[in-house]
Image (tube, rainbow, N blue to C red):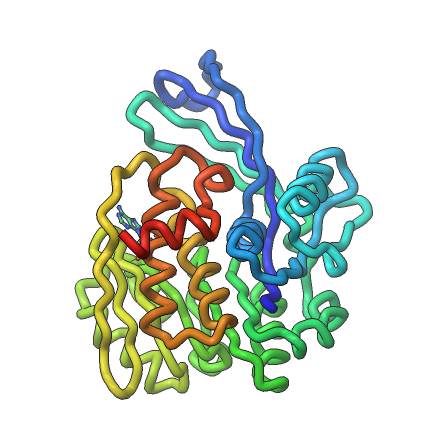
Amino acid sequence: VVTVVGSFAVGLTLRADRFPVAGETVVGRDFDRGPGGKGSNQAVQAARLGADVEFVGLVGDDDLAAMAWELYRREGVGTRYLGVVPGRNTGVGFIVLNAQGENFIVLDPGANGCLGPAHVERARERLAQSHVVLTQLEIPVEAAVHALRLARDAGVTAILNPAPARPLPLEHLALADVITPNETELRILLGLPPDDPADSLDLCHRLLAAGVRTVVLTRGARGVLVVEPGGVVEIPAFPVAVVDTTGAGDAFSATFAVSLAEGRPLAEAARRAAAAGALACTALGVIPALPRRDQLDALLAA
Ligand code: ADP
């Protein structure tokens, strides 16, 4: 039983040979729209692994919201705590890809920006009955912190995927049992520049010193470090043919959460999560690339 507290947004993507300059119109092609948002992606990943998942989030009262309901019906994600905000638009991201595959993104959080402690409070019972609560920072920080606090008060494992990163006070970070940053997020969380040369392991130990039980540091193709006061376990990445790495972090955090909810030990959960992260890199887009349980088990058994 897993509960995800987070964001839903619709991605509107198109391709152009190059980005326009200010005031210029460039003709593009391959327009596509699809559901995204870190919380939503993670809820879908958890459902694909067979977990009992509820998604706590907000959409707007516009036609884009239909994409959320349809996605969750199709994927088997619970919507008892998915609310609609009157007068607000659904979260949306405008994404332009150039010929080099670089992107240019403008995001309007819309309804996600209205998610506050009061809305999370409505899911209190569900949070308390969960094995794992998983949240991210694509919603107001007060909502994420409240989810972590309710989990902690109920003795439920709380995981913070600190993305997109922003500096957070150590006492907020300490509410999480597990934090799953990548290397730039780790630095931003601690108020450092994203490319700060400090040793990542030292930075992980700062989080442990603040009261976080476990830091699971994701390092892209270099795999994962599971850092605890008692020691460090290194999990190598699974070698795969990479097509598009977007969504690797979402697949990772959700699979890690489901694996802990299944009662697996930390290192095994991190290994399963690394396999899911690798599989998420093997197809274009996020939702189409999130692996199902049989795909995950096949890679783990290979
Ligand atoms: P994010 O997408 O949040 O930046 P990472 O890139 O670290 O996160 O990816 C999360 C995890 O997914 C990694 O720790 C790794 O296990 C897996 N992963 C990511 N990129 C690759 C890759 N190129 N090859 C194999 N595994 C990968």
Which quadrant does the N terminus fall into? bottom right
Residue under the point 27% across and 51% down:
302
Residue 229 position, x and y percent, is: 29, 86
Residue under the point 66% across and 79% down:
128
Q: Is residue 287 above or below residue 124?
A: above
Q: Name which quarter of the figure residue 60 lies in.
A: top right
Q: Nearer the viewer, residue 9 or 87?
A: 9
Q: Nearer the viewer, residue 207 or 131?
A: 131
Residue 85 position, x and y percent, is: 78, 50
Q: Residue 187: in sight, yes or no?
A: no
Q: Residue 94: in sight, yes or no?
A: yes
Residue 176 position, x and y percent, is: 48, 77
User: Is residue 156 shown left or right of residue 82?
Assistant: left
Q: Nearer the viewer, residue 203 or 148?
A: 148
Q: Is residue 298 above or below residue 233?
A: above
Residue under the point 33% across and 28% down:
101
Residue under the point 65% across and 53% down:
77
Q: Nearer the viewer, residue 271 or 221?
A: 271
Residue 293 position, x and y percent, is: 47, 52
Q: Is residue 18 above or below residue 81?
A: above
Outermost residue, right direction? 86
